[in-house]
Image (cartoon, rainbow, N blue to C red):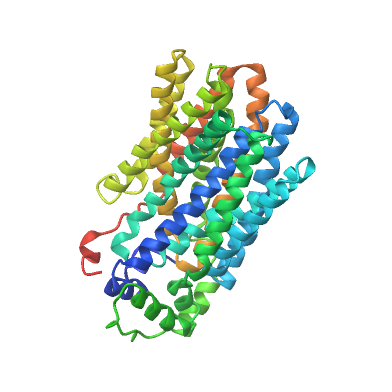
Amino acid sequence: MDTFNYDHQEKCIISDELGKIGWGKYQYLLFFNCLGGLSLAMVWIETTAIIMHLETFTALEGTLLAIFMNLGTTIGTFLLSWLVSRVGRAKVFKICTIIEFCGGVISLGGSYCLYLGLFFIGFGSGGDMSVAVTVFIEQIPLKYRRYTSVLNVSWCIGGALSSLFAFLISRFNFLSFEAWTIQMVICTLLSLLLTILRMKTLESPIFLYEMQNKKVYDVMLAIAKRNSQENYLAEFPLLRKETAVLDTKASIFSKNYIHTTLFLLVVYFFSSLAYYCLLYYMPVLIPIDSEETVYYIICLQQLLGIPGVIFTLLFMDGKFGRRGPQIYGFALSAIFVGVFILTYDIILIIFVSGIINAGMMAGLSSLYTQTQELYPPLLRGDISGWANADCFLAGALSPVLMQYLYDASTFWSLILIGTSFLISSLFAIGLRETRINKKKVLSS
């Protein structure tokens, strides 16, 4: 298969079969499992952002913590996404939280163990952010595909939870341990819980089908059984061998995909650069001395991003499509970063930063959904790996760039964020629209 259009997804036999089974208990559990993993990844990232600004660490040490976290995430994204296309989605999905748990345990050793622990935490988180959306989108009926955008509410939930943990720990910490240590323990235990919950996750039937693996019949029957659809019969033919061979020779950098891939990576890089710059430096951009109040405000700011996800969910199958939320959402964020520069009142800061987060989340929610739709199944692992590695490369650069610009002037650090949003908006225009034709999927 050398070319790709959205009909590839609509004509996929497994999508039709999943439509016969319908949405049920298995999809609900899978959704919350993926949402939990993505939220935990964001909790780890936000926790790192909080730790790096503590008085316990120097500015250099704090910057190194963020770099180790993002270095691990970048490497984990590439390696685990490579495995996703070869050993399967479910195995990598389960391994991710195990690695995060091990990293959490290592980080509790303190001193240099914290750097090593954050590297492994980032490694597992990067894999989770690469595979979770693919795991979900390949096990749901086609007409529910827009729910993939809801998974991106994890960016808000994770950031809010981390700030909430920090707020509660700083307020009610009666133990002799440092606050950041307690927060790392909580995150490590959450990793263990998710590891247990993922043990019963099934392999992606679309992946098995593309690989001509007869286990696809067992998986489809298992999904039907968990959804209480015992009358379902898996009687579809396997993919023809010659079609599968052509699929394995495709590349996200081949002639037919190179334009899409390059534009997509630019959008990922600059939107992520803006996101991480805001994430890591919001604690110092808020003009308040009270640590508890700052945590409370950051938690509120993260939650204000949820309306952006809801907007994308409601309108991405309409005239806005997949590109609209990216083009207008990132542009809106860029405009209000300019307003943020001129804002000094704390109420206005919360309001303006809330709009920035909402616009950003509208764009990111649509971006992650569209990424999976722009490529055929066997290339989804590859593009997820490259896209997320691109994200975390931006994450690794953001503390260095922001520290340099912030030391010079807050103005220039905010200009970097606004410009990044603007570039993301402009390059999103060059992406192909993948909005679903509702008339073609009513029967699924």
Find residue 93 and report its image quarter.
Answer: bottom right
Taking the image as shown, residue 260 lies to the left or right of residue 226, namely right
Residue 8 spot, x, y in % from top left: 37, 68
Picture coordinates of residue 238, whole percent (x, y): 41, 84
Residue 408 seen? yes
Residue located at (52% from left, 34% from top) = 163
Of residues 5 and 397, which is closer to you in this image? Answer: 397
Question: Residue lying farthest right?
Answer: 112
- The C terminus appears in which quarter of the rendering? bottom left
Residue depicted at x 49% and y 82%: 213
Going by the image, does 139 lie left or right of 405? left
Return the x and y of residue 274 as percentages of the image width and height.
Answer: 53, 34
Q: Above or below — where is 386 with respect to 233? A: above
Indicate whether 259 appears above or below 43: below
- Near-viewer residue (154 or 109): 109
The one nearer the camera, 286 or 367, is: 286
- Given residues 408 and 156, the one toward you in this image is 156
The tally of labels here is 0
**Residue 157 quadrant:** top left
Residue 325 occupies which quadrant of the picture? top left
Q: Please say if 11 is above or below 277.
A: below
Residue 386, visible in the rendered structure: no
Asked if residue 117 lies left or right of residue 315, the reply is: right
| Residue at (21% x, 65% y) in the render | 442
Work out which residue is located at the far front of the displayed protein and give it: 174
Q: Position of residue 389 (x, y in %)?
A: 60, 50
Q: Residue at x 51, y 76 (%)?
A: 246
